[in-house]
Image (cartoon, helix red, strand yellow):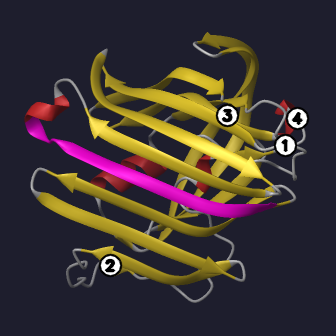
Amino acid sequence: MLSGTAAAPAAEPSSFRGEYTVSYLGLSLARASFSSRYADGAYSIDGSVASAGLATIFDDTRGTLKATGRIAGDQLVPTAFRADYTSGKKASLVDIRFAGGRVVSTKVLPPPKKRGRNWFPLRAGDLAGVADPIAATAVPAPSLDKVCDRTVKMYDGEMRANLVLSPVEKGTIAVTGYEGPTVTCRMQFQPVSGYRKGRKALEFLRTKSRIVVTFAPLGRTGIYAPIHATVGTQIGTITIHARRFEAG
């Protein structure tokens, strides 16, 4: 998962680091780390992801991510997102640029294959006011109580989806680098456009999956980032947990 950004210009730059493990039935599948920096109402986030444990036998994937943007009230406004990754010997790229509150260019390599009749295309207006996959996971809010009641419009370079957050409970957590309050949200995944109709995995996420995300504050920035999450899939529950969540 992801580190976040500052909700307002800070007196001094702030930086945070998060390290995460993705697991299934207690078996490690992937690891990710994110470093973020905030100054003068702007953010820059760098991340890396790699398959781990048993997953490397089937799919050795590694990649880097970078996102930049600014903060406007209770919204993160992206300016650029880029993901470079390799799966085995196959290299892939997603590059999204934003201006004026909307997507102005998308580059995907290798280029997507020709779409069939069951493809739900992007529509006019779908790419306005959207967040990239990194910005979509960071929530600006004045307090824990205000984190969950919102809908995040996400665009990953192909699909537009809504992430609808609703409150579950508040609690506490202790991991390396952080011990303190959290808030847990239920997340409903709603595909909007840019996807194939009838795809079973997406239909399961939309209608049957239970997705729960626990957020913790990034210092005094006014941003809340995921520290723990569970995602129900057709094969079982995937768990994402922060091994480290700290300033500096």
> Sequence order check: which comes first, mark 1 or mark 3?
1
In the image, residue 24 lies in the stretch drawn in magenta: no
Within 10 Å of disc 1 (Cα), the crowding (few <14, some 14-19, many 20+) is few
Residue 50, how many percent across, how many down? 29, 39
For disc 4, the marked residue is 143
* Mark 1 and mark 3: Cα distance apart in space: 30 Å
Residue 67 colored in magenta in the image: yes
Q: Position of residue 73 (x, y in %)?
A: 87, 59
Q: Which residue is mark 2?
A: 119
Left or right: where does residue 162 sit relative to residue 108?
A: right
**Marks 2 and 3: which is nearer the front?**
3
Q: Is residue 54 above or below residue 77?
A: above
- State whether the magenta stretch is mostly helix, strand or loop: strand
Q: What is the magenta range?
A: 58-71
Earlier residue among tags 4 and 2: 2
Q: Earlier in the sequence, mark 4 or mark 1?
A: 1
Q: Amino acid at mark 4?
A: Ser
> Which is more N-terminal, label 3 or label 2?
2
User: Label 2: how many residues lie within 10 Å, few (<14), some (14-19) or many (20+)?
Assistant: some
Q: CA distance from mark 4 to mark 1?
A: 21 Å
Instruction: Name the secondary structure under disc 3.
Output: strand
User: Closer to the N terminus: mark 2 or mark 1?
Assistant: 1
Callout 4: SS:
loop
Quick one: 71 or 241, which is closer to the camera?
A: 71
Nearest to the eye among marks 1 and 3: give it: 1
Residue that mark 3 sits on = 185
Q: Which mark is residue 12?
A: 1
Crowding near the residue tagged with mark 3, few <14, some 14–19, many ≥20 C-alpha atoms within 10 Å: many
Q: Amino acid at mark 2?
A: Trp
Task: Pick whichever of labels 3 and 4 is earlier in the sequence.
Answer: 4
Nearer the camera: disc 2 or disc 1: 1
